[in-house]
Image (spheres, rainbow, N blue to C red):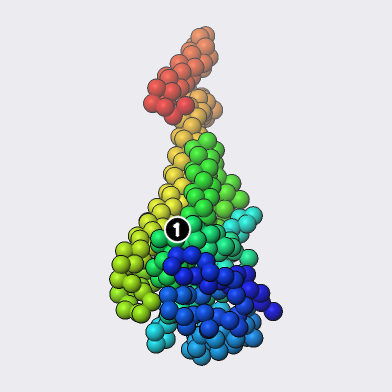
Amino acid sequence: MGRVVAAAVYSAGKKVTNISLDEGATWAAKPGHFVWIGLEHPGLEELTTLQRQFNLHELAIEDALEVHSRPKLETFGDALFIVTYAPIRENGKLIFIETHIFAGKGYVITSRNGDSKSYGAVRQRCEARPLLLEHGEDFVLYALLDFVTENYQPVTEAIHCELEELEHNVLRKDLNESDIHRIHALRRDLLRLRRYVAPMVEIGEELQKLSFPFIDKNMRPYFRDVEIHVKRQMEDLSNLRDIASQTIEISLLLESSRQSLTQRKFAAWAAILAFPTAIAGIYGMNFENMPELTWHYGYYMVLGVIVGGCGVLFASFKRSGWL
């Protein structure tokens, strides 16, 4: 069972009175008046009442009872049906709350199907701007869409902060398995955000072109403003995806560099140890006729050659940065 969050009549940019659902059609039919109704979790009963009150198309009602995968705009005669999604991010989990908007001559109806940020803030903002609210249904429609696009900004900023922190961690230490899983999860969230943001560009473009009795041509720049905001969100999401990809690439490059440095050190020490090993191998062949075997200082000379050769190799590798 759904509930009516707010239902009111507006005229000349001011609120006239609160109403019940059964009074909507009477007030909407009055010249210069329009009804703004906000519902939460509506069921078939509430939607049927709205259909009877405002002559909503049956296909729009069917759409409102379905779960959609993306935002969209549908036209039914002189009425609009818009599906929007508001993102919520709690404990690192991204959720999208679906909202349906019915708009036509004399009415704007919102149907929120989740615990997203309340649209009461939109109503207060509109009521505080009577000169713009005087435009009627089209300004309310703009305010609702603008509010939806605003909800993406804090989510995007939170993801941006997490990616920056991971990027700084990459420069200080190797990424562990949990960090890699986190970056992958953030990239997946960015893809999901883009999936729900992208159709809003088309909705903004369509609203600028449509010719409806309740949409004034002077309001088209406002819908273009929604389109511009959405395109900026798209750019931000693309940039964040690049940052996530670059963070992984930097981590791989740094890890490769660290491994290369370790391998160089092993190679340098192996070369240094190979020098005395080679000399010891020669003297371990047990040939009978070896001149140095009968020389009194042969042992000390060989030790000196080993120490001197190893010292030269060590200094050479140190100078080249291998040690």
Residue drawn 51% across the image and 53% down it: 154
Residue drawn 48% across the image and 13% down it: 304
Residue drawn 43% across the image and 79% down it: 31
Q: Mark 1, residues whose alpha carbon is within 10 Å: few (<14), some, or many (≥20)? A: few
Answer yes or no: is residue 237 visible. Answer: yes
Q: Is residue 160 above or below residue 43?
A: above
Q: Is residue 272 above or below residue 205?
A: above
Q: Quadrant of the N terminus?
A: bottom right
Q: Position of residue 178 (x, y in %)?
A: 61, 50
**Residue placed most toward the observer, 264 or 311:** 264
Q: How many marks?
A: 1
Q: Position of residue 164 (x, y in %)?
A: 49, 44
Name the residue tied to disc 1: 129
**Residue placed most toward the observer, 237 or 254:** 237
**Residue placed most toward the observer, 316 or 250:** 250
Answer yes or no: is residue 202 visible. Answer: no
Q: Is residue 323 left or right of residue 65?
A: left
Q: Is residue 290 above or below residue 97?
A: above
Q: Position of residue 55 (x, y in %)?
A: 50, 88
Residue farthest to the top, as pictured: 296
**Residue placed most toward the observer, 169 or 26:** 26
Q: Position of residue 323 (x, y in %)?
A: 47, 26
Q: Please tell me whether mark 1 sits on a helix, a strand or a loop.
A: loop
Q: Is residue 153 above or below residue 107?
A: above
Residue farthest to the right, as pictured: 1
Task: Indicate the amino acid at tag 1.
Answer: Arg
Residue drawn 30% across the image and 67% down it: 218
